[in-house]
Amino acid sequence: MSGPQCCSNAPTLNPSSGSGHVEKFGGLDTYVTGSPDSKLAILLASDIFGYDAPNLRKLADKVAAAGFFVVVPDFFYGDPFVPGDDGSYANLPTWLKDHGPDKAFEESKPVLEVLKSKGVSAVGAAGFCYGAKVVVELSKHDFIQAAVLCHPSFVTLDDIKAVKVPISILGAEIDKMSPPEVVKQFEEALTAKSEIECHVKIFPKVAHGWTVRYNVEDEAAVKAAEEAHQDLLEWFLNHVK
């Protein structure tokens, strides 16, 4: 039996990847990159594999190069999800009990407080798979100014209906966690709220996790991921200022 899509293509973690560095931020080990003097910041909430994933850090560096100060907190305290030796995911429900997105949402608040204390005037947040649930919770309040959800996991229609900030949802054609028909429901709920700016896009021929768990040697996969990264970046450039 193969694992669920949330666990497919597990990345090879590398704590020294990226051009930024790790420091304590709001009580959490956090990968930080970009100018600490920037008044505009972006928080990236990782998938279940955590903040050491090289593709995620590469994206953080790319966002930082556009002028943002970027933080990628370790919401898992050095204990990201690890599939079984046979690639099985039997231990995922147990892991989630100790690492729920609700807990990560609470732990993101001190990180945002530190950003504000450093003079940051606007914050955007992007979440990937599991991290999208953290970001959608932030979007229900005035913690952030804009949100991007990439191939969300655990996000419900009620969550989307409660969003209060400009939000972009990037979905995959092949996704059991948020299939295209669910993403379309999200879009309908958002477009019904004329006061909320939204952007919803379903990428063809890609699977859940494609924006951060792509094979760097697969040209088509890299191209699809880079298109999503550009969409994410443009959303933040337009709404976090």
Image (tube, helix red, strand yellow):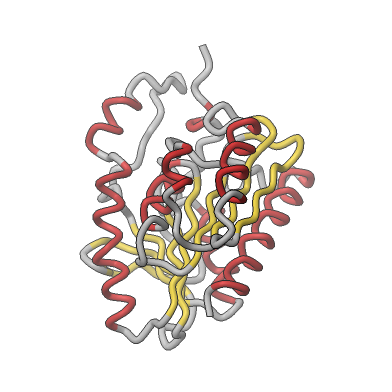
Q: How many marks?
A: 0
Q: Please tell me which residue is depicted at 62% across the width and 51% down the height of the picture.
A: 191
Answer with left or right where residue 4 lies relative to residue 225: left
Q: Nearer the viewer, residue 239 or 175?
A: 239
* Residue 74 higher or lower than 143, as above or below: above
**Residue 194 in view:** yes
Residue 125 at x, y percent in the picture = 46, 62
Q: Nearer the viewer, residue 118 or 53?
A: 118
Residue 107 at x, y percent in the picture = 25, 56
**Residue 58 in view:** no
Residue 153 at x, y percent in the picture = 47, 37
Q: Please tell me which residue is depicted at 29% across the width and 50% down the height of the picture.
A: 104
Answer with left or right where residue 42 lies relative to residue 172: left
Which residue ends up furthest to the right in the rendered image? 220
* Residue 123 higher or lower than 91, as above or below: below
Query: For residue 148, what is the image quadrant?
Result: bottom right
Residue 219 at x, y percent in the picture = 78, 47
Q: Please tell me which residue is depicted at 73% across the width and 48% down the height of the picture.
A: 224
Query: For residue 114, what is the image quadrant?
Result: bottom left
Answer with left or right where residue 222 lies relative to residue 177: right
Q: Please tell me which residue is depicted at 43% across the width and 36% down the height of the picture.
A: 154
